[in-house]
Image (cartoon, rainbow, N blue to C red):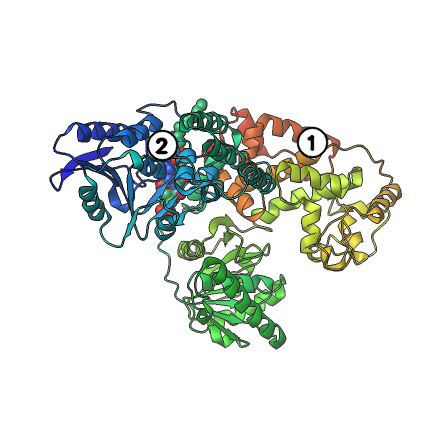
Amino acid sequence: MAQYSRISGSVGLITLKSLPVNALGAVVRQGIVDSLKTALQDPKVTSVVICGQNGVFCGGADIKEFGDSESGPPLIPMIHAIEAGNKPMVAAIEGFALGGGLELALGCHYRIAHSKARLGLPEVTLGLLPAAGGSQRLPRLIGVPAALDLIITGRHVTAAEALQLGIVDQVTDHHTVDAAVKFALSVAGRPLDARRISSYSCPPVSGDLDALFEEVMRKVRRGARGAIAPVACVQAVRAAATLPYARGMERERELMATLFTSGQARALQYSFFAQRAVSRWSTPSGARWDASAPKPVRKVAVIGLGTMGRGIAVALAQAGFPVVSVETQEKQLTEAKRAVSQMLERGAKRRGVAAPLDKMSYSSNIQAVADVDLVIEAVFEDMGLKKKIFQQLSAVCKPDALLCTNTSSLDVDQLASQTRNPELVVGMHFFAPAHVMKLLEVVYGPRSSPQALATAMQLGKKMGKVSVAVGNCPGFVGNRMLKAYVEQAFFLLEEGATPELVDSALEEFGFSMGFFKVSDLSGLDVGWKVRKEDGLALPGVSTGPSARIRQGRRYSPLGDLLCQRGRFGQKTGSGWYQYGKPGGRVATPDPWLHSFLEEYRAQHGLVPRRIDPQEVLERCLYALINEGFRILEDGIAAGPEDIDCIYVFGYGWPHYRGGPMFYAAMVGLPKVLERLEHYYRAHPDVPDLQPCSLLRRLVASGSPPVQKWKEAIKKLHSQL
Ligand SMILES: CCCCCCCCCCCCC[C@H](O)CC(=O)SCCNC(=O)CCNC(=O)[C@H](O)C(C)(C)COP(=O)(O)OP(=O)(O)OC[C@H]1O[C@@H](n2cnc3c(N)ncnc32)[C@H](O)[C@@H]1OP(=O)(O)O
């Protein structure tokens, strides 16, 4: 709702009231329309202030209403009525004014913001554009280049930047509504024509307008990788720059109509709520986010300063935690100190803040962690080494310190069993580079306490990560699913594809890099080492029937064969592609690799066939999705949202496709099932292609929408 009152004798005060973010749902819009009418009709009222309750102006249109048929007064005429009003309207912005919230403020004649407020038009992140006049008013107010920047990126600006850009008229450190009322009293009776942004023309740009838009559009198309909203945002701003306001509004509506019902908007809005859903974690044992208080974490240690440890230390220091970093190899320690300082300085420069160098301390002695509240072990993926470190930590640390491992696939429970307090051990699986990547898998073992899980989840949140609680199994969620995808990519090469074909299909789908390019970038030796440890990559088994079978199932030794030839990817100058020189970054197709594949197929009696991009996508993605269903069935992830967040924020899954499980629902579960059955018939020695029983059950129960899967999964557990 919106509450109306008259204060200071002559100021009409409209307060938006809809917790938690005063979104502009139907009831709020009705309240504003009614309040506005009262204020305009009351002769005692000479000016109006619009504010929001609870220190929040407005979080925008109510995203939860987007799927419903429209009810209540529409937003656009409501904002027009505010702008057309014959009494000065002042927006009092506290907390945030985002999306429709900022558009409402832009309809007002003046805007006063609290110094801590944030403003922005983040619609693009929901697959939309600012379609309540935002794409037309903002460029008229602050100019085309600045408006393009805000609308295409969806970034929030501080009140100080908003003032500098000309979005707000005044910034206050005091009570915002009081300041706005004072301001409203001072402008009462002033002419308003020059304050109605819709009557402005966009300020002229320096240089050629067409050239500017062409350049921006080129950049946006390149960066968007198939996302349609950023492109529509540019088109809408172009309309603002080239058309009269009314025609610009028509164009804005046309573009919005296309976006509004698009699969991309659905996916991005699903992802918005998925991110919030994963923070309300629960485990099969009944532990829940709202029932376990996290332990206070004041000081943290990182063990091991390789690539991962450095990134984790930087992310912790940037989040304000004092960090003790332990590295026993002196040479590595010296290098790491320099690298970490550089990373902190670069990050600080980018964010315009001071580098938190004082948060870091270093030691080559594990005793230095004696007083910390939480340790993150980030040494090599070697169970023996990690066990030893956990024994040491258990002896050195405070008895109530949380001991975490950054392992990407090893058994967290085995590490817990090395300690005095196994309930205080959890996995904190970061993704490289750890100070950049948003994802954190928090792995609970059967003995981890709810409080330990709550503490790691909260620490992740403080570090700005999307933290997802997952169960303990080889590879957890992300890497376990990835294994099925990688295997299909190898099999496709055996059957006739090239790395270029596989990668281009995946890139066309929206991944920034296909699997083989990623593999060259991260180093083929990484997977080789894991396969050797798992007993899969065996020395000397490159011919004969056993070369392509391991542990009773089909296996492709292609990656091992390249590694045996020293082709580790970019770092050695060749892998699945060639790079000209060690450390080269530009992938070019490699004729040697093509002949190698031909010889390999001939040697193993494989007759190459034509493989189309559709098969590449179906084989790689459906195998991965199938494993996702198994993970849900096993209770390793609490719901499809958890898996989708992991893939979007940790594995480069295109955001506008929502995540693998959402994508499966979009494609249609019956189709995913039918294609998996088809491929499993063709490849009965590949268990990953055998459709999982949860998928079959969901199809049998009418393929409910992804938001309803949790119910089906719960029923599944209750039957166990
Ligand atoms: C068929 C042809 C149709 C033709 C169409 C043409 C018609 C055109 C008319 C449409 C007009 C469009 C108007 C406008 O341009 C569109 C929009 O405004 S879209 C919304 C834009 N706003 C945002 O993107 C902001 C989203 N929210 C946030 O970023 C954050 O929530 C926050 C506001 C910064 C607050 O952050 P936090 O404090 O961390 O809190 P949470 O994030 O946890 O949120 C708390 C709680 O609030 C829920 N929520 C937040 N924002 C909204 C919202 N806008 N609508 C609904 N609900 C919201 C959030 O989900 C949390 O709830 P929970 O999920 O935990 O229950």
| Lower sequence index among marks 1 and 2 | 2
Residue 620 visible within the image: no
- Mark carried by residue 614: 1
Q: Nearer the viewer, residue 584 or 302?
A: 584
538 to the left or right of 50: right
Q: How many marks?
A: 2
Q: Is mark 1 within 8 Å of ligand 1?
A: no
Q: Residue 630: horizontal and vertical position, in percent? A: 58, 39
- In the displayed structure, 254 sits above or below 401; it is above
Q: Quadrant of residue 212?
A: top right
Q: Residue at x 58, y 33 (%)?
A: 693
- Amino acid identity at mark 2: Ser
- Mark carried by residue 199: 2
Placement of the N terminus among the 4 image quadrants: top left
Q: Residue 62: horizontal and vertical position, in percent? A: 36, 33
For ligand 1, give the image quadrant. Answer: top left
Q: Nearer the viewer, residue 458 or 12?
A: 12
585 to the left or right of 342: right
Q: Residue 139: horizontal and vertical position, in percent? A: 43, 38
Q: Nearer the viewer, residue 417 or 589?
A: 589
